[in-house]
Amino acid sequence: MRSGLLAVSRVLRAVSTTALWLSGAGLVAMTAIVAYQVYMRYVVNASPPWTEAGSIQIMSWFIFLGAAVGVRERFHMGFDVLLYALPPAAKPWLRSISDVAIFGFGFGMLWYGGELAIRGASVRIPVLGLPQTVTYLPIVVSGFLICLFVLERMALRLAGEPVDADAVEPTLNEAS
């Protein structure tokens, strides 16, 4: 079972890396579109109508995909002060409680973002001609990935894998 879990973890690492690369490509694409919009507005004096809506759509994708990657890599916000005061045996419990809360948040994104996406299927974004579902799809995909990444971490922790090893506080010798 442990080898299967590690194989799934490798696949999810590839998914996370792909999401990170897509986020980076989205950031570059959005920057290019905004630069094009500025050039067209101030030099040519004819700004294309699709550039603002298009850049906002791309921005929502790279923000939400980046947030999901942040959950997997534990770059998301946290309140770790209590971890420093707890004995080592209690830390995995507190991290598990945190994971359950993050899972709930991701599931809420998936569920309610899905409702918004379904409701927006019949509405078109005027400038882009795309269904409004496209606006809410990054929330759904990110919520799904957050749930998946948290389940991975919880399963690895239950299997005894060192998922919290990089969150070690400095020792007294390192701090001085």
Image (cartoon, grey):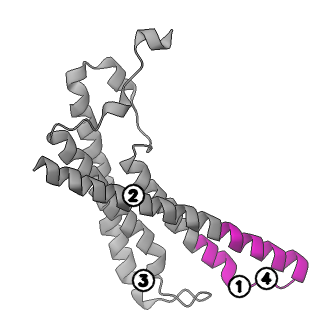
The Cα atoms of the two marked residues, 4 and 1, are separated by: 6 Å
What's under tag 1, amino acid-wise?
A: Pro
The mark closer to the camera, 4 or 2, is 2
Q: Which residue is mark 2?
A: 16
Q: Is residue 3 left or right of residue 143?
A: left
Segment colored magenta: 30-56
The Cα atoms of the two marked residues, 3 and 4, are separated by: 27 Å
Element at badge 4? loop
The Cα atoms of the two marked residues, 4 and 2, are separated by: 36 Å
Element at badge 3? helix
Q: Position of residue 98 (x, y in %)?
A: 29, 40
Q: At 48% across and 13% down in the image, what residue appears?
A: 175
The mark closer to the camera, 3 or 2, is 2
The Cα atoms of the two marked residues, 1 and 3, are separated by: 21 Å
Q: Which residue is mark 3?
A: 120
Element at badge 2? helix
Q: Which residue is at the front of the view, 122 or 128?
A: 128
Question: Are the residues at dot 4 and dot 1 in contact (C-beta closer than 8 Å)?
Answer: yes
Give whichever of discs 3 and 2 has the lower sequence position.
Answer: 2
What's under tag 4, amino acid-wise?
A: Ser
Give whichever of discs 1 and 3 has the lower sequence position.
Answer: 1
Q: Residues within 10 Å of mark 3 (few under 14, many from 20)?
A: some
* Magenta stretch: dominant secondary structure: helix
Q: Which residue is mark 4?
A: 47
Vertical side of 167 occupied by 56: above or below: below
Vertical side of 173 occupied by 69: above or below: below
Q: At 15% across and 50% down in the image, what residue appears?
A: 3
What's under tag 2, amino acid-wise?
A: Ser
Q: Which mark is residue 49?
A: 1
Q: Position of residue 141 (x, y in %)?
A: 37, 68
The mark closer to the camera, 3 or 4, is 4
Q: Is residue 41 left or right of residue 10?
A: right
